[in-house]
Image (tube, rainbow, N blue to C red):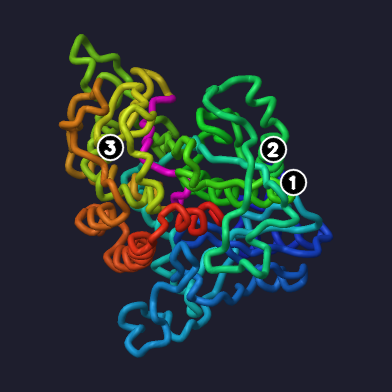
Amino acid sequence: MHADTRAGTSARMSADEATEHCAALIEAGDLELVRFAWCDTHGQLRGKTLTRRAAIRALRDGLGMVSTLMLKDTSDRTAFKVFEPGIESTLPGFAGANNLLLRADPSSFRLLPWTERTGWLLGQPVFQDGRPVPYDTRAQLQRALARLAQQGLGLVCGLEIEFHIYRLCSPESDPCLDPDRAAWPPPAPEVRLIHPGYNLLAESMFDLAEAPLRIVQRTAQALGLPLASLEIELGPSQVEAVFEPTDALTAADNMVLFRSAVRQALRRAGYHVTFMCRPPFDNIMASGWHLHQSLVRLDNGRNAMTREITPGPGDRHHARQTLSDIGAHWLGGLLDHARGMTVMCTPTANGFGRFRPHALAPQSIVWGFDNRGAMLRVIGAPGDPGTRIENRLGEPLANPYLYLAAQIHAGLSGLARSIEPPRATESPYDDTQPRIPTSLGEALAALGADPAMCAGFGDEFIRYYTAIKSAEQQRFDAAEDKTEFQRREYFARF
């Protein structure tokens, strides 16, 4: 189902009207099943699959879901002791693995193109009395966008996502499906490359990888996702998908759906997809998620980062040669809070191996004009409505709601304090520059010490998120075989 036939096209409807319109689509589509999905802390979709009649009831009344699903670390273990006395003081509303209520967004309704007669809806958890759950990451982005809207601004985002596609050696004998090898987390599948790599954007490499990339293309387009291009990246079996810019919430929703959809569609065709940053092989290239962002004025839709008047002769390294005052202060905020936001952009123990010099990945907290070695790349010119800032800090496994919310909290701090960015760098790997955190533990400490992040996300969420990610870091530190840990923890499932 394409974007123009989604229930969400009726934006002018009331909530009740939108729900009934979606219910009518489910009924008229003669569906057998509807999946109710929601995005967990790690940016992965979970949910329940209902029959058609049950789905219509759940659309109107909500759907029960066990609360511990919000408390899982990346191994899928519950990071909090919900059955012990006193848990209510730590996690109010989560004692005893009780139920939450999943409420679907009727505007998200789609038909899944890789399976038969199945619909899909994106939802958000609330408490039984209707109160929002403070740990819901989509709600975190919604609150951040509401803060931004108070300034008369919205956020527009374009996505560039690098990832790896492998051919399964023997799908019928996949070790993760062997009952004698079942484990928690499961063993990783055995795979082969779809292209040998080290031939960036080579047409012959695209032709070699075209079969799985066609599945990616058709799946994304059938879901109404604004896919613009598919490209061969430098590393073996590494590819990239680029999406047209949309508003921030739509971009985040698209990201979680894209990752889940292509993994499922390609798995059925005998391929394994991973969005982990550095797959556990000797000769690979790390993947990044480059987030293009610009501010839009809500009253007229114009790009608020564009410098309208061409500046006179001046220092070409000055941000205002390209950006408006608002854009320059936003850039200053992103730089000032880069360490604090890092874990929201690169949230796995695996992802920090990407921050290496001369690897088209950042190492230091610097910005540059159209410089792919800098953490922040400013693109555009005076009068250019496409003027924007590209953040190259993220890994493709990041939770998109948290990644985007972190930009807003940092940027708003820059606006509030009129932070002036330093001069643009021409040497992004200069060792004298302030460094990006080098481990998950260091990044978590930086998050807790950042006042803008703590105020924006809320102390309660920061404590919750730190506890879950600390469990991952502790298990990684304790693992005797770090490579095998990453095979099972990330490669097998993410």
Q: Residue at x 63, y 20 (%)?
A: 203
Q: Label 3 belongs to which residue?
A: 330
Q: Label 2 belongs to which residue?
A: 212
Which residue type does callout 1 highlight? Ala
Tell whether 85 sits left or right of 418: right
Part of the protein shown in magenta? 386-399
Marks 3/1: CA distance?
44 Å
> Judging from the image, what secondary structure is the residue with disc 1 in?
loop
> Judging from the image, what secondary structure is the residue with disc 3 in?
helix
Whether residue 465 can be seen here: no
Tell whether 155 sits left or right of 230: left
**Classed neighbour count for the residue bearing mark 2: other residues with Cα under 10 Å, few (<14), some (14–19), many (≥20):** many
Q: How many marks?
A: 3
Q: Nearer the viewer, residue 251 or 362?
A: 362
State whether residue 374 is above or below residue 220.
Answer: above
Name the spot of residue 26 as percent of width and height, x first.
Answer: 76, 60
Tell whether 73 sits left or right of 449: right
Q: Earlier in the sequence, mark 3 or mark 1?
A: 1
Marks 1/2: CA distance?
8 Å
- For discs 2 and 3, the disc positioned in front in the rendered view: 2
Which circle marks residue 269 in the picture? Answer: 1
Q: Are marks 2 and 3 in contact (CB under 8 Å)?
A: no
